[in-house]
Amino acid sequence: MGLSPDIWQGFTDVLTKAIPVLEVQSFAWKSPAGSSNYDHPSSSNLIAYNYLSLAKDIERLNDLCTIARNLLATTKKAQNLAAEKGFDQRVLALVDTCVRVTARSFDGETNPRNEERWQKVVNLYKRLLITCLQFLHNFVMHNEQRKMVLWLDLFGYHSTSDSNIIQPKEPIDQAL
């Protein structure tokens, strides 16, 4: 399966569609106003409100990323196909979403049920983050060039199209 371009394209397509859905259900600033019966502006309350769908979606994405991680056992050819189809970039976007959710503390109204639901979703995001990091480890295993590109992606650098000069994605003073 890891040697099939269609599999990697399908995985990429799933993450491309899933990440915005997770973000709308997890970040108050991404959730359209008046789009649901939800009326509490904190991200924690939004996560608690969307608990059932988030739990199911995150678990499915964790299963998909586990399969993708295991498909890299064939190493270079599977790594190349995953990169060619952009799956690695989607995993990096998913890592970003996971980190943004798990790095925040509960900011909702004092409600034990909401806090419990929020904590369960945060724990699922942490598990998904670990699986994504395992995928990235397998993605760069025995491949020094991929390791360098991953580090540059993670720390905000990219190669310009005009030259091989590596430049930050945004000026350092704006990043701080």
Image: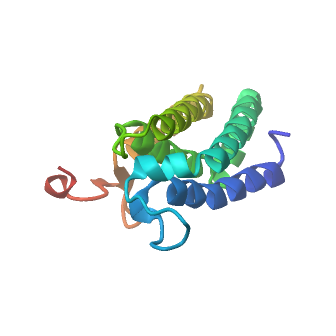
Query: In the rendered image of this protein, does residue 66 appear above or below residue 169?
Result: above
Q: Is residue 58 left or right of residue 121?
A: right
Residue shown at 77%/55% (left/top)? 10
Q: Is residue 17 above or below residue 3?
A: below
Specify whether residue 27 is in view: yes
State how many labels appear.
Answer: 0
Type of colouring: rainbow
Which image quarter: residue 37?
bottom right
Res 74 → quadrant? top right
Q: Is residue 136 above or below residue 7?
A: above
Between residue 83 and residue 108, name the one nearer to us: 108
Quadrant of the image occupied by residue 115: top left
Is residue 93 visible in the rendered image? The answer is no
**Residue furthest bottom as drawn:** 34
Q: Nearer the viewer, residue 84 or 163?
A: 84
Residue at 44% over, 55% down: 27
In the rendered image, residue 107, in percent from the top left (x then y), is placed at 33, 44
Horizontal relation, residue 147 to residue 18: left or right: left
Residue at the spot 36% in from the left edge and 46% down from the top edge? 109
Indicate whether 67 appears above or below 7.
Answer: above
Name the residue nearer the viewer: 8 or 96.
96
Quadrant occupied by the N terminus = top right
Residue drawn at the location 57% of the way across and 45% of the way down: 91
Query: Whole-percent x and y of residue 7?
Result: 81, 49
Q: Position of residue 50 (x, y in %)?
A: 58, 51
**Image location (x, y in percent) of residue 22:** 57, 53
